[in-house]
Image (spheres, rainbow, N blue to C red):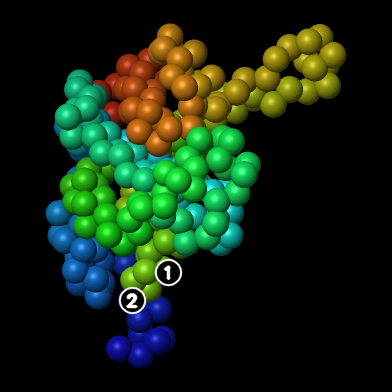
Amino acid sequence: MSGDQETVTNVQSETLPWPERFRELARQTGDDRLKAFYEAGCVAPDTPMKDVPFVAVDFETTGLDPDKHSIVSIGLVPFTLDRIKLGGSRHWLVKPQLPLHQTSITIHGITHTDIDKAPDLDEVLDEFLTSLAGRIPVVHYRNIERPFLNVALRWRIGEEIRFPVIDTMAIEAHLHPNRRLNWWQKLRGKQPVSIRLADSRLRYGLPHYPPHNALVDALASAELLIAQVQHHFSPETPIGDLWL
């Protein structure tokens, strides 16, 4: 296939519904692990939320720029709306391609000693993708997990990965469109609405968890989505109404 034909094929696949897109991506990929991930399939967009298998995902990284920083830990928690499956949770420390920064060590507490003998992401990629397969990923702020994972995969296998995602921060942003204060509200001392993970959880009466641990933050995101559905949507809400 020529480069132009491949570009046309990729553009066409982006317009397909996710189940069909997964089948097309399984045909296109040259990596066996990605092929298995796509062949596991994707639920149809009209599937009720109550019938969707989810997996909450969180990365800790060495910084915020995926082109300059790297993933240093991964947390996964599978769940449905009525059950969080802690027995299936996973947590990996992985050796970053680029050095740790003191700032990131201060934030997430992962040190050079912790990652000295940690595996490269490529060594846990099969387990990671198997844990995602057939489930809809849930994150709090997709602009971390999505770009960091794609950069990491481009470095290692020369491909990116495609899947729909539920972003609990995007849901909070939608629910609080006027969270930024005008000058009069600021003058009166009103506090802006925060859509950070911990602050969002407080609005639903969820307990405080220490931040910046990938596994704990994944669990926190899972619990937050369940609360959001209970308060603002319905178990019958089609998954296609919320995924991105």
Residue at x 43% of width, y 19% of height: 209
Task: Identify the amino acid type marked 2.
Answer: Thr
From this view, report whether residue 51 is shown above or below residue 198: below
- Mark pair 1, 2: CA separation: 23 Å
Query: Judging from the image, what secondary structure is the residue with disc 1 in?
Result: helix
| Mark 1 or 2: the one toward you | 1
Quarter of the figure with the C terminus: top left
Locate residue 163, reporting x and y percent: 32, 53
Residue 133 tag number? none
Locate residue 142, reporting x and y percent: 46, 44
Locate residue 117, reporting x and y percent: 36, 53
From this view, report whether residue 161 is shown above or below residue 173: below
Locate residue 105, reporting x and y percent: 55, 40
- Residue underneath mark 2: 9
Labels 1 and 2 touching (C-beta < 8 A): no
Q: Categorize mark 1 by other alpha carbons within 10 Å: few (<14), some (14-19), many (20+).
A: few
Task: Identify the amino acid type marked 1.
Answer: Trp
Mark closer to the chain start, 1 or 2 = 2
Count of all numbered marks drawn on residues in the image: 2
Residue at x 54% of width, y 19% of height: 199
Q: Categorize mark 2 by other alpha carbons within 10 Å: few (<14), some (14-19), many (20+).
A: some
* Camera-side residue of 209 and 1: 209
From this view, report whether residue 145 is shown above or below residue 77: below
Whether residue 110 can be seen here: yes
- Residue underneath mark 1: 155
From this view, report whether residue 169 is shown above or below residue 93: above
* Camera-side residue of 192 and 110: 110
